């Protein structure tokens, strides 16, 4: 398993590529088994498996990088492990401990070392831990058996245009989550719910959707697959407090960096009709890291944020700081990097 691949690292998209294999561990009889390496990307599953019918499935997304010094590092895997437990708890699943989760991630990288993009390419290795309920159940009840799968795929920048501002549409015809639903859990079904609004926005020419809060439809919740952050002209970093958004680790990390840069971090409900208070808006998440948003269409009102062709100065600095740490160019003072 050490063939050298001639992948075009600089032009990778965000898609599944075949690798050397993946890891799986199963929860049976009340306990987790061994971390096993598998090659065949198809898995046998009972046709009545709970995850297939009732959506008992949640996942994570995190990245490994090759640093300037040539080390392979994972970024904050403990936070992903903790969030997977949170998601699992909400939908009555067993989740692995932090140690087991990280061991599975480590193994998935080790068997795919030659798929970790080299330093300097702007690419990274995306890890997808997936937790599914596998018991054959027809009556509605939680599964008692689970599988954790971790597969990897090398990825380039999420958006083909790279760090370039996009325009978003506030979606009022659909919600991705309910007020006390599963929006805080990274569960598979949330994405099924956001596919149609996402497709409709794309058809209208908007690459991303901004969801309103599902209770009152008057506050900002989050973008389809990423958190909302915004900068005010007097140096504030604002992000919504809402019970239906996914707690982004990228957002959490950027808040720490923003504070270190002297910005004031504020988490509060953000009214959709108060978007004109912001000079910069960004969509943040592991896959895209940070996508600047230069305009948001809300009903017949279009809010704009800075130059449509160039990202704002503050978001650019935050982005560079985060990427600098991930690629080992800036000291990792918070010990966010875990060496593989
Ligand atoms: C995963 C996800 C995010 C981003 O979270 P990160 O931890 O930063 O990757 C944001 N919103 C939703 C709906 C998500 O599923």
Image (spheres, helix red, strand yellow):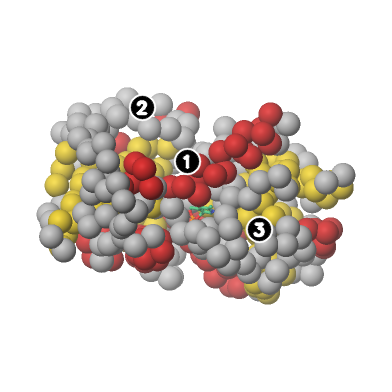
Q: Residues within 10 Å of mark 2 (few under 14, many from 20)?
A: few
Q: Nearer the viewer, residue 296 or 288?
A: 296
Instruction: Tell me: 11 left or right of 297.
Output: left
Q: Residue at x 22, y 39 (%)?
A: 46
Instruction: Tell me: 29 left or right of 313.
Output: left
Q: Residue 93, image x and y in percent?
A: 31, 60
Q: Residues within 10 Å of mark 3 (few under 14, many from 20)?
A: many
Mark nearest the camera among 3 and 1 is 3
Image vertical order of residue 37 relative to residue 8, above or below? below
Q: State the CA–CA distance, disc 3 to disc 1.
A: 36 Å
Could you tell me if residue 230 is visible in this image?
no
Mark nearest the camera among 3 and 2 is 3
Q: State the CA–CA distance, disc 2 to disc 1.
A: 13 Å
Residue assigned mark 3: 214
Q: Residue at x 77, y 47 (%)?
A: 296
Residue assigned mark 2: 7
Q: Residue 22, image x and y in percent?
A: 23, 41
Could you tell me if residue 100 is visible in this image?
yes
Q: Earlier in the sequence, mark 2 or mark 1?
A: 2
Q: Look at the numbered disc 1 and give the secondary structure of its residue.
A: loop
- Asked whether the residues under the numbered discs 3 and 2 touch, taking CB atoms below 8 Å apart as contact, a structural biologist would say no
Residue assigned mark 1: 122
């Amino acid at each position: 398993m050490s063939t050298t691949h001639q992948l075009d690292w600089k032009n990778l998209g965000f898609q599944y590529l075949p690798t050397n294999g993946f890891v799986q561990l199963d929860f049976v009889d009340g306990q987790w088994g061994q971390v096993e390496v598998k090659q065949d990307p198809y898995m046998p599953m009972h046709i009545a498996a709970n995850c297939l019918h009732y959506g008992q499935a949640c996942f994570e997304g995190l990245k490994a990088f090759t640093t300037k010094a040539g080390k392979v590092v994972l970024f904050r895997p403990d936070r992903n492990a903790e969030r997977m437990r949170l998601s699992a708890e909400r939908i009555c699943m067993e989740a692995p401990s932090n140690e087991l989760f990280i061991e599975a991630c480590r193994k998935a990288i080790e068997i795919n070392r030659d798929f970790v993009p080299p330093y300097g390419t702007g690419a990274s290795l995306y890890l997808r831990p997936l937790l599914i309920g596998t018991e054959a159940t027809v009556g509605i009840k939680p599964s008692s058996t689970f599988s954790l799968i971790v597969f990897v795929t090398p990825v380039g920048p999420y958006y083909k245009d790279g760090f370039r501002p996009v325009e978003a549409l506030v979606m009022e015809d659909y919600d991705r989550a309910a007020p006390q639903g599963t929006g805080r859990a990274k569960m598979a079904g949330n994405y099924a719910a956001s596919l149609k609004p996402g497709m409709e926005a794309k058809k209208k020419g908007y690459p991303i959707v901004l969801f309103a809060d599902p209770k009152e439809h008057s506050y900002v919740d989050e973008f389809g697959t990423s958190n909302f952050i915004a900068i005010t002209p007097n140096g504030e970093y604002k992000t919504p407090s809402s019970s239906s958004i996914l707690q982004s680790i990228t957002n959490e990390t950027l808040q720490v960096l923003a504070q270190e840069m002297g910005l004031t971090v504020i988490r509060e409900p953000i009214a959709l009709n108060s978007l004109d208070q912001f000079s910069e808006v960004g969509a943040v998440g592991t896959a895209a890291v940070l996508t600047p948003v230069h305009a948001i269409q809300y009903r017949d009102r279009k809010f704009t944020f800075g130059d449509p062709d160039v990202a704002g100065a503050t978001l650019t600095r935050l982005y560079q700081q985060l990427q600098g740490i991930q690629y080992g160019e800036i000291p990792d003072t918070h010990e966010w990097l875990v060496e593989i």
